[in-house]
Amino acid sequence: MTNSADVAVVRMNAYLNLRLIERCRELENLIDESSTAELQLVFPALIDSIFGLTNKIGWGLHNISLTKNPHEYEAFLNFLGPTGPIFSLCYKLLPDCYLKYDFPVSYLPTKIRTMLEEGIIPPFYSDKLKDDQSSRLPQVLSMNPYEYYIFHFAYHLSNPGFSFSQQKMFDELGNNLRPTCQFIFATLLPRDNSTVLPLIGPYEHHSNKCLSQVWRSETVVQVFGLLLEYTEEEKLISPLDSRLPPSLPRRHSIHSGEHIRLVRAFIKTLHEFANSSRESYYHQFKEKFIFLRKAIHHWPLDSSFRLILEAWLSFIQPWRYVRKFCSEGNLEGDERGKINDPSRWMSFVANNLLAYTAIFEQLLPRFIRTDLVAPKNALMLFRVTKVFSQPHLAEMLIETESCMDDANVSRGGKITATQWSAIVKQQILELEGPNYKYNPMFSESTISKIIWFLSTIKQAHLTATSIVEALEKRRLEKKIFLTIWEFFNGEESSTDDIGLTDRKKVPGFLLNSQQQIIEIFQIRLEDTPRVAIVADQEYHDSILSTSFSHQSQFDSSVDTHRPGVFVRIQEERHQFRYIEYMGDPEVQPVRSNECAFLVRTLYKICEIINSKYEREITNSYWRNDMIGRMAKRILQPPTIVRCLPKRTSKGFTLAQESELSPRLSLRILASYNFLVILILSILVFRFFEYGTYMYIFCLICWTFYTLIETACNF
């Protein structure tokens, strides 16, 4: 006989086949109507269905965005949020202290797995570990429903196996699961010294309310702090990886943009939580320092580095996340984002000195190698110098570094100096090891590097200024023609997709950065190198030579030295992206300056002609007389088409190449440029009262003249 728990599971499985909105509504009703005994079986199956820990599919929450799926997004946000049905389900099951669910150890970061295998058990895991009877190694974590849900949620956010469209998530800033995560942070890590939301559920909870709130907040901090950390898989190999079943998913290192945004959101929330709490959470900030240190070391030299940079700048500015409420409950805006009381933040600066000085020293060679003429790189430099030029910050760093000098400490005799000295030395020992040699940020060696870096900034400023002036001059010279061209084709752009408006900001960024660096390190004018600094003429010429014009936009598509053709896809009014197309040129995507209907119609006509007269067309193309030269002018040359390897269930397929024979292509007739010229010429003939036959006759004569002239000069 089927019991009620089995019926609840059957109902849940039926609801999982519904659309997301109906699914969330029906599951919410199921949770409200079912008893605790029934929900004990529903809970693990529902969590696995949502996050797809077994099949790595789940509900596809990463693909639901606020802009494209607003109703579905709101439905799952309410369903997963701290005031929604899932948390209500967790709180329903919590009173049963013997109810535990197993979370595989293999899902944890490699660093934690290695520690557990070596017998080093962090306090958070001490009462949760269950060993395998045969290998005597930790196999699963036994946890209550609340912890089970938080672990699954954090793992789903931080694991790349669930991010099916990383580039899409990279572009859509915050339209997926990250806002839900921030909602959980804001609720369970309160920012205004308020209490955590009370337990949700139709039962009485007799345990200590304060302890319950602290336990839930501590769980969120611990779980997200561990699963969002930076691990280097190639350097950390645990025996657990080889002894566990191969079908079990593994937790991999994450360096994606979405992961960095989650880390930044966690840092900001942790700042707000710590600023409203009396307890210290410096140990969590130390873990994030290690994350940023490793991420900066491995991150490539491109504009995406700004994600890491913004996370670091959020880390070193806790004063930006202070919520000071008046008696009316309003936020005092003038207190936010400023160091109004240096003594309040001195402790944080001392406890996290390496986050300021060591990472700054790590960034300096990176900025020296970076192309500072590029607008995004110039903006990153400006962001860094602007933060360090804040009032009182440089003084706090200088004071903290001076405390490290034992001679100064002994002469001064201040208790605070001795305290900061011990804190900084202990911090260096814990984070960098006993062999690390600390190089003060304001030492003579660092300042000498800064002085030479100022020369690099000065040259970049001169180069950026000369490029802007040259582009402005070119724009004025072609103003009339450019206006007509932009009317039909959009704004002129360059190969690096950098517009003139963005380039105009670069000199200002670099000039302000230069002045702020001088103020931070108190560099005198006579200390700067007396060398003649001029603009980088080679870089200047390369930027100007790569600017696209209407003559060269389509020349790159017939470059025989490239394996494919580059097709420009217009995304917005003044933004383009280029894709390398390696298939048949005739079936490449329709461009923004082409008529889609004509492209498809002319392709079908050419396909019929090429199929019917393939032999005649090929023979004509390879002839060495005038007919062959005219054919080479009209027909498309032989083209090699490449088929890239594809992933299948049996592995990757082999790359294949095939050659297309000479063929007729009328695609140029589908361009708006040709249509505009055609219409204008017809209007001119109409204006001079010439008939249609005269127009056709002139068009045929012009065509034959062009072909004969080409054949004679071939």
Image: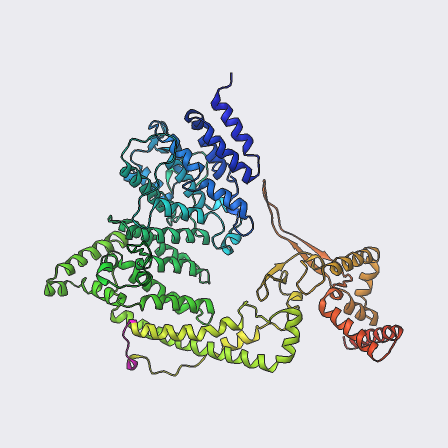
Please provide percent x and percent y for residue 155.
42, 42
Of residues 437 and 620, which is closer to you in this image?
437
Left or right: residue 709 compared with residue 3: right
Q: Quadrant of the C terminus?
A: bottom right
Left or right: residue 339 compared with residue 21: left
Above/below status of 82 relative to 502: above
Above/below status of 655 relative to 577: above
Left or right: residue 418 compared with residue 452: left
At x 41% / y 66%, what residue is drawn? 380
Q: Let me know if residue 288 is in the magenta part.
A: no
At x 84% / y 58%, what residue is drawn? 613
Please provide percent x and percent y for residue 523.
28, 76
At x 41% / y 68%, what residue is drawn? 369
Above/below status of 487 relative to 325: below
Above/below status of 455 relative to 145: below
Numbered marks: total: 0
Please provide percent x and percent y for residue 648.
59, 43
Please provide percent x and percent y for residue 495.
57, 68
Q: Let me know if residue 523 is in the magenta part.
A: yes
The answer to whether any part of residue 434 appears in the image is: no
Q: Residue furthest front?
A: 328
Of residues 543 and 313, which is closer to you in this image?
313
Of residues 10 and 604, which is closer to you in this image?
10
Residues rendered magenta in the picture: 520-526
Res 301 quadrant in image = bottom left
